[in-house]
Amino acid sequence: MIGLKQLLLRPGLWLTAAAGCAVVLATVLGTSSVAVSQDQSAATPKDVIFARKVLMSTIGDNMDEIDSMLETGKVDFNEANHHGDTISILLMAFPHLFPPPSNEWKPGVDHDPGTDTFASPDIWTKFSDFYKRAQDASKAAYNVSRSRTEADFKKYGTELRAGCDGCHNLYMKPQ
C-alpha cells in the first residue's frame, strides 16, 4: 500500500491517485442522482415474478443440457463450461428477484403459471437460507464451468443438480 509520504515524493503517482479519486467521485455523484430520480414503483410484483420466471427458465434450459451430458456420459466441455457459467451468473442474481411485495402465494386458488408465483412464503421468512443455497448452487455451477475432466464435471454437475432439487423442495410450491 502506498503511504502519504510516497505520494508526496512522487508527483506522478500523486496525480494518478488524485485523478482516480476524481473519477470515482464523479461516477458516484453522477449516478446517484439518476437512481434517486427513477420511479421504483414502476415495476409491479407481477413484473418481478415474471422476470424471475424468465431467469429460472433460462437456468432450467441450461441445466437440462448439463443433465443430458451427465446421463449419457457424453461431455462436450465447451458446452458444459458455457452452461455452467451461465447458470452461475444467473444464480448470483436470482435471490435479488424476491422483494417482499412479490410474496404473493395464495393457497387453494387456481394459479396462472405465466404470471402467478409458485415461490413458497418460506423464502421470505428464511431468506438467509434461500440466499445461501443460491450462492452454493452458483459455486457448483461455476465449478462445472471450470471442469476439465469427466470426473470433475460429474462431481460438480451432480452437486449442482442436488442444490437445485434441494432448493425447489424447500422453496417451490407444487403447480
Image (cartoon, rainbow, N blue to C red):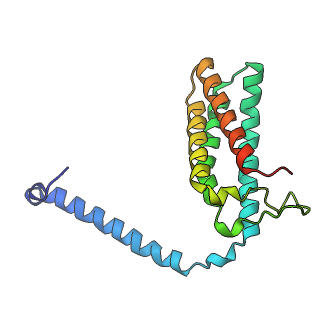
Q: Quadrant of residue 54?
A: bottom right
Left or right of 157, for residue 21: left
Q: Residue furthest right?
A: 110
Return the x and y of residue 174 as percentages of the image width and height: 83, 49
Asked whether residue 109 appears in the rendered view, the answer is yes
- Res. 4 image quadrant: bottom left
Q: Position of residue 76 (x, y in %)?
A: 68, 24
Q: Is residue 144 above or below residue 124?
A: above
Q: Which one is in front, 84 or 170?
A: 170
Instruction: Name the residue located 73 percent from the left edge and 47 percent from the top edge.
Output: 58
**Where 110 sits versus 58, above or below?**
below
Please provide percent x and percent y for residue 166: 69, 40
Q: How many marks?
A: 0
Q: Name the spot of residue 156 as percent of width and height, x first.
A: 61, 28
In the picture provided, is 32 more to the left or to the right than 54? left
Any part of residue 89 in sight:
no
Image-based side of 20 in relation to 153, left or right: left
For image coordinates 62% across by 76% down, the residue present is: 40
Of residue 110 and residue 1, the one placed in the foreground of this image is 110
The residue located at (27%, 64%) in the rendering is 19
Name the image quarter holding residue 168: top right
